[in-house]
Amino acid sequence: MKNSSLYNNLVNECSRENVAKLLSVDSEVELNELYKHALNTKKQFTGNNIYLRGLIELSNICLKNCFYCGIRRGNGKVERYQMGFREIVDAAVYAWKNKFGSIVIQSGERNDKAFVLYIEELLEEIHRRTNHELGVTLSLGEQTEETYKRWFERGAHRYLLRIESSNEDLFYKIHPKDERHSYTKRLKALETIKKTGYQTGTGIMIGLPFQTIDHLADDLIFIKEFGIDMVGMGPYLEHEDTPLYEHRHLIPSSAVRFRRTLNMIASLRLLMPNINIASATALETLDPNGRIMALQAGANVFMPNLTPEENAINYFLYKNKPLYNGQVIKYLKDFEVKLQKSAQLIGYGEQGNSQRYAARV
């Protein structure tokens, strides 16, 4: 069949042309075949279990001024917050007690000494309170090599630093070109994270203004050639209080962004069978079943948000972000019922470390 032929071409030659062809699949028959192939590949290499990562959005204070982001430094309409120490630890313990294998601590980017020390103390206390059983992923932006090492030594297992676009020209269309937003520094930071010993993660936005299928194909090739262990990528969702909003007429339709995201997930699963791929929260903004569909197309990580709602409402990277209204466990149980229809299970209590990372180290 056509998709099988495309996949065989991809295995034989991971070229921009072959990846772009797979990303461009759009007929219902071909899409179903692509997603089925990706799902089977995932089950073969990483199993039937979906790994839970409880998301804790520590703070929306950010030094960066990215053109697409709702919590960018220049957005004066945002009510800034930082969660308290006990509040964060309690969220981590809640995750552990409810058999989440891991948490993700995410924040706007800061690198002052007080913040670095705050994260160190959090890591130590979280591990103490959870009997060192809870995996911890950090997504706290660009830091110094010393900081990465200090956090790693205190028990951070994974680090996610999204490149957003591996194309330098496109990178500077969505970021200011200044000292705080350097494409070269972003790449260097990823290299340092990998060298430090983290399970290394990155990600991109799909459906940006100015973005082409070739850009997306190159993104997947970049992820493969860099040797990334885990990936979080989702559709670009515009925010009216950002500079990129003025280019909204260049954004593909919601349906196109949604399909391209699923195609990216499926294609990456075929390219890199043993990595971890997250089902992005943003997919649920475009379709109520978006995250389920991503897991059926090759993703294997699911991240319920554990941030207290009074803070989560101010961590709006984009509009219409899904919130659980304090009903995380109920949402998870309902989600599990849907998941079982595709013969997949939630891996309660499993850290779900990247099998690619295990093979790499």
Image: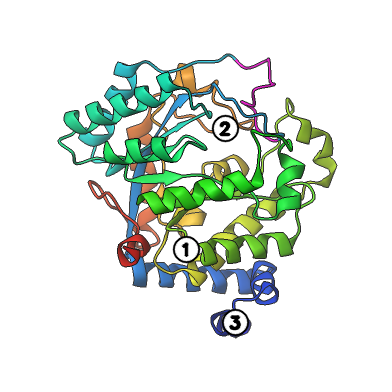
Location of the C terminus by quadrant is: bottom left
91 and 164: which is toward the camera: 164
Element marked by disc 1:
loop
Mark 1, Cα crowd under 10 Å, few <14 / some 14-19 / many 20+, is some
Q: Please state the extent of the stretch shown in magenta in the rendering.
A: 68-78
Front position among marks 3 and 1 = 1
Tell me the CA gap for discs 2 and 3.
38 Å
Identify the residue at horizontal 42%, vertical 53% (top origin): 194
In screen coordinates, is 241 left or right of 198? right
Element marked by disc 2:
loop
Tell me the CA gap for discs 1 and 2.
31 Å
Tell me the CA gap for discs 3 and 1.
17 Å
Identify the residue at horizontal 29%, vertical 17% (top origin): 86
In the depicted structure, whether residue 299 falls above or below residue 112: below
In screen coordinates, is 30 left or right of 60? right
Q: Which amino acid is tagged 1?
A: Gly
Whether residue 282 is in magenta: the answer is: no
In screen coordinates, is 112 left or right of 6? left
Q: Which amino acid is tagged 3?
A: Glu
Q: Which residue is mark 1?
A: 227
Q: Earlier in the sequence, mark 3 or mark 1?
A: 3
Quarter occupied by residue 53: top left
Q: Which residue is mark 3?
A: 13
Residue 171 x/y as whole percent: 70, 47
Location of the N terminus by quadrant is: bottom right
Predominant secondary structure in magenta?
loop
Q: Which residue is mark 2?
A: 321
In screen coordinates, is 173 left or right of 51? right
Residue 318 x/y as whole percent: 63, 32
